[in-house]
Image (cartoon, rainbow, N blue to C red):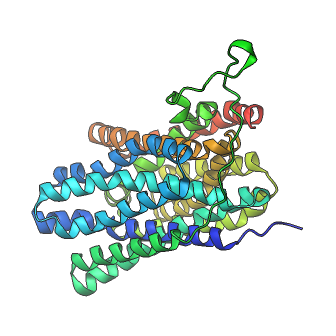
Amino acid sequence: MQERLWNRNYCRVMAANFSLFFAFYLLTPLLPLYLVERFDATKDVVGLVLSGYTLTALLARPFSGFLVDSFPRKKVLMVCFFLFFIFFGGYLGASSLLLFTIVRTLHGAPFGALTVANSTVAIDVLPSSRRNEGIGYYGLSNNLAMAIAPTVAIYLYRLTGNFELLFWLALIIAGAGMAVDSRVKLQPPRRAPQPSCKEGHEGKPARRPLLRLDRFFLVRGWLLAVNMVFFGFCFGVVSNYLAIYSKEVMGITGGTGTWFLLVSVGLVASRLQGARALREGKLVLNATEGVLISSVAYTLFVLCPNEFGYYGSALLLGLGNGHLWPAFQNMIISMAHHNERGTANSTLLISWDVGIGLGVLCGGFISEHFGYTPAFWVVAASQLTGTALFLLATRPFFQKGQL
């Protein structure tokens, strides 16, 4: 008989993850407007203020993986969630652009740490025989939050015109998620063997150094991380320059919300459809389907600058990423010992963040000097390069290196 997947602890972690991402996406679409209306900020200042959040989240990832693997995970989780929760109150008290910038920038650190801690705890509470499938379903909570929260935020703002209401709502929802996570019960941690230790004199294992690269980055999974940078690059360009490209090149205005909604629909559908393959351990098959479908999506987007290509690519991109993400996450976790799960999670998230950051920078540079169409051709080329890298190198790398 199969072990039970939807146990109480797993459901609690899922609900908490939905809450944290709902609070995050509730503010994301309207913060640029808030900065302009409240502080009269210019476009370049808005970009600078909002980029600080991503930067500190990226910097926090490797250290959070180290903390999660080195200290009691439940305590690390609750500290990260409390900090993430309390910073929403900082937005309410920020009376100047400088104070808001400080709060927003610092808020990225607990967000980056919390996403690593919560996903690692989710892995811990899953039965080992259902772990691959459970990680796939876990991502549904992110996808649902991404689909629902922006719509709720825009509706409430149009109804009330009150930004403070959104800040209070985000604070309350984050607090509810923290309360749910506080009820998660974890088993006492097991001590795993340290295969990297070298034997000392008299055949005794030498003490492992407290600080070394593999405490912050899963060196065994380096090629998976490199591969994910290519895919993060593509999404970084598309997510940041989609609205401008669609307006100037395709003549589509006001369709950005629908585009992201279709991405979410594809993500949810692919995670449900791919659950069986994950349950059967077909990680490579799932990843292969994901990278191929995503390649078709990005190519269609740039080849067909019309509504068919625009909305069709959104649905395909959701389907592709919905296969790709849980497969890659399971693959890198399969290359880690149980006391390295936090490091494995943070490694994958770091590579995704690096790719997105490079996509934002390179996409802006290329579009400024050559136009938006060449920028999106670079996106298609990057995706195809990442796909070739996976098929020719990363796939055999994983099959050889999994534990």
In the rendered image, the vertical position of residue 155 relative to residue 287, given as above or below: below
| Residue ID at (54%, 43%) | 70
Q: Is residue 228 left or right of residue 367?
A: right
Nearest to the observer: residue 273 or residue 75: 75
Quarter of the image with the N terminus in it: bottom right
Q: Of all residues shown, which one is farthest toward the right?
A: 1
**Which quadrant of the figure has residue 204?**
top right
Q: Residue furthest front?
A: 202
Residue 145 location in percent, x, y?
48, 70
Q: Residue at x 16, y 64 (%)?
A: 94
Placement of 141 over or under 72, stated as above or below: below
- The tally of labels here is 0
Question: In this rendering, does residue 259 appear at all?
Answer: no
Q: Residue 210 location, x and y as percent? A: 52, 30
Task: Compare residues 319 and 20 and report the one nearer the observer.
Answer: 20
* Residue drawn 57% across the image and 60% down it: 318
Residue closer to the observer: 45 or 237: 45
Compare residues 335 and 152 and report the one nearer the observer. 335
Residue 83: image x %, image y %? 35, 60
Q: x and y percent of residue 262 in the render?
A: 52, 68
**Residue ID at (58%, 54%):** 120
Name, please, the residue furthest toward the bottom: 159
Image-quadrant location for residue 149: bottom left
